[in-house]
Amino acid sequence: MASGILLRRGDPPWTLDYDGRSIPCAPGENVAEALLAAGELGTTRSLKFRRHRGPYCLSGDCGTCLARVDGEPNVRACLTPVHDGQKVVSQNRLVGRGPDPSALADKFFAKGMDHHHLMVRPRALNEIMKEVARNLAGLGTLPDRVDGRGATFRHEAPDVVVIGRGQAGRAASQEIRRRGLRCIALERMPGGAKHDDDFDAGVFGIYPDEGLICAAAVEPRATDRIFTLRPRHLVVATGARDPMILIDGNDTPGVVSARGLVAAMSRQHFRLPDDVVVIGPDDPGARIARGLNARHLRPQDVERIEGSDAVDHVRLTDGTRIDASLVVLAPRPGPASELARQAGAPVRWNGAGFEVQREHPGGRVPSPGPWTLWAAGEVAGVPTGRSAHDGQVVAQALCHREGAES
Amino acid sequence: MSHRVFVCRCEDVTTHEIEDALDRGLSTVEEIKRYTGLGTGPCQGKECMCTLVGLLVSRGLADADAVQPFTARPPAEAVTFGALAAVPESPPEKGGAS
Amino acid sequence: MTVTNEMGSADAALPQRADVVIVGGGVMGLSTAYQLMRLSKGRLKVVVIERSYLVSGASGRNGGGVRMQWADRQNVELMMRSIDICKGLAQELGINTWFRQGGYLFLARTPQAEAQLERNAELHHHVGAPTRLLSPEAAREIVPQLDVTDVRVATYNPDDAVVFPWAFVWGYAAQAVKRGAVVRTHTSVERIEPEPGGRDGFALHLSTGESIEADTVINATGAWSVGLNRSLGIELPNHPHRHEIMSSEPLKPFLDPLVVDLACGLYFSQSTRGEIVAGVSMPSEGDDADPTEINLGSSMLFLGRLSRALCRVMPIARSLKVLRQWSGPYDVSPDGDAILGRTPGFPNLIQMCGFTGHGFMMAPVVGELVARNLVQGKDHPVLSRWSPGRFDDPSYTGRGETMIIG
């Protein structure tokens, strides 16, 4: 087991059970944070190469912190608050003696694995391979019991729906409410001070043909709520995320995304160990490294990240070895434009991701839905530092248009 | 240990699998997604799609001004069948719980 | 880097003239192309023209079910042959098809459905298909998670199967190309016209500005066939219908058969990757719109209806999560039977359309019998029964297959 890569300032009062081991945890933390703090970095094995994988994005986007929590499979550890006595079980991670499965995969599939043409012939071998593959695939097993909790449904038709309560979304919703319009602001990662019309729910679907925006409470599902919304204006302020940086060993447990880590630290006041490395271009890598008091490396100078079940060190192209227990990837952020695209927004490649194309000035976006669509902040390619201002500008344009119409 | 650079961690797609797809004549984001499985796992491309596009653009295999992402479809968040089953066949026009 | 273009290419060079031009690079067209090349020992000049990329249409959007449980004797027999082909198809095509014979389990909750399943079981027994009538309790032994409260009877056929559909398309394409066929992707047929000078061939005008002549044209464009036929003044009664489908997050294997609940048209299976793949019958509204418009959108209406049906039939699904929804076009024929064979007035235009949602599973056998007809002159009863001219025949009853799902 590796050492913890998130350090707390005090002793946590609770414990959770992870694969039979007792892990300390504190109110307000999520399961991924508790595991990282305990040095439990691997929550699963990868599909083909059977590599150790664990929490990476720390913000509900990636697929490798999925665990079985209190009898329910495929729960995102990074979205699930801890509670005392919680039962967390790793998934797809055959525990036992014998050779390390990832070492076996490395031996037999050193270059790669072409699953389309793997052991096709003869048929008898193919039949065995299919059965093995079927059992290696899949993540969680079925829930322990039938979920008897019913979900509650609510439909709303406010003036405005804002998706995201980051800098742009918060600024936009405050300005819109200040001008007297009813505005529901949705946020998938709960936390922070809230207005009555701030719902903790993630939008999972935008259906322009049906005129519906659909949201549901993400983890925890103790209180399952689902919403349909039919606003006259839709403001997408979904921000950005860190795309993967192409470096050998970039999947090693203990490699995390800069955005997710910075957000976790601001929520929970964790400290970091001394041997932290930030890999990314000068902007934003150098800035993030300064903020984390960590060493900054440019991707082109890194040969590979080494370690099997946890990061051990980073090897540079000049042969230098830098010991590290935590590697932070800080690429240029890519706009999180999936929901805007569901709403039919046009997007263009900006070198890091697909940003929403707005009509200037004001931030309106051409769209097929029955609402007027707007985009604010990083999702439209606006830099982090100007996101709050952009949210306000979009809100003013929206209210101006609303005034002109009514 | 083997050296592997991952583009998509959900489906274990490395740069090697991308090269293989390109060698077979597949060239668009949609084709590479389907052949390699990139973006079809639990993250649905949130982590990997932009990395793939960046790779294609940097090699001159995609036009930066014209390239488009693969189709965005619901759900953008994990949502349970149980929650979805609570939505009535035709949602009411006015606000309120049901 | 050597690019093999083994699955077709936008750059594949077209001959000026071909013996057979197949319009549509779906599984139907490519299975036929492969069989034409195989049976003619590479002597025929065959060109496949696909408007987009391979697996972009219905062949890439279906649930991958392959069954012999039909109501019509001929369909049962055809599908027994198709399943027989599928057993060795991975080896024949040199690609993993992930063909898995977990059976199909049909549930009847109404007296009508019960009578249907009893008729099926008797017919299947008569033609040698291993379908068994089961009590609700016996159905639960096969899938213990089912709620069989008001199930009257079930049928189970252990030879029915699920597959990974995309591999069929890629495998047929690669084998056709290997034998000398040309597979041109990202190119659509804008217009088709009879060759001048009294010959029975055609000239096809392409979106790239190119033209190609052909002695025989096969219309294997499925839901897109209406537009192509209209360019020759041909009106056939098939029309596109959007069919929606979804998949869940991956789970360890627990579900062997594909389950169909006839009461609501729900079907679900578990793929090799562990996802539950499911669809449900939806209203046909919108089908009267322009039949040359294909709607591939997704709806909340579907997601809600599917979820209610799935949670009722398999309550453990309540806490399982949806990963993705999408849709594909059914090419619906008014009597549920395909539209297959020579077109009235255009003997060298072969229709391979109207498969009403079961084209994928029939493609291995139908490609074979169409190629046998063209290369060896062999007839098959379905070529007259499914003839495009049947709708004009005074003895046409309008009765066809009734076991259409979805």
Image: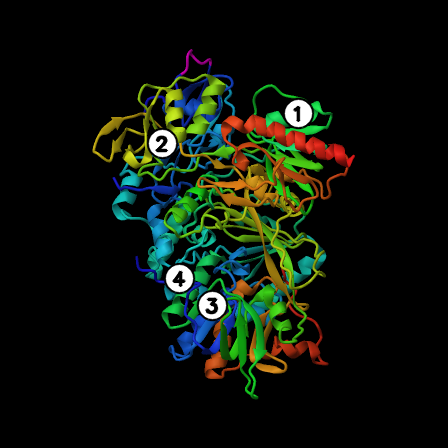
Q: Secondary structure at mark 3?
A: helix
Report crowding for label 3: few under 14, some 14 to 19, many 20 or more residues within 10 A (C-alpha): many
The answer to which quarter of the image holds residue C15 is bottom left
Residue C90 bears which disc, if any? 4
Residue A175 bears which disc, if any? 1
Q: Main secondary structure of the magenta part?
A: loop
The answer to which quarter of the image holds residue A333 is top left
Which stretch appears magenta?
A: A8-13
Q: Amino acid at mark 4?
A: Ala
Give the percent coordinates (x, y) of residue C96.
39, 58
The numbered mark 4 sits on a residue in which chain? C
Which one is in front in this view, the residue at disc 4 or the one at disc 2?
Answer: 2
Residue C30 bears which disc, if any? 3
Q: Is residue A35 above or below residue B90?
A: above
Q: Are marks 4 and 3 in contact (CB under 8 Å)?
A: no
Q: Secondary structure at mark 1?
A: helix
Q: Amino acid at mark 2?
A: Pro
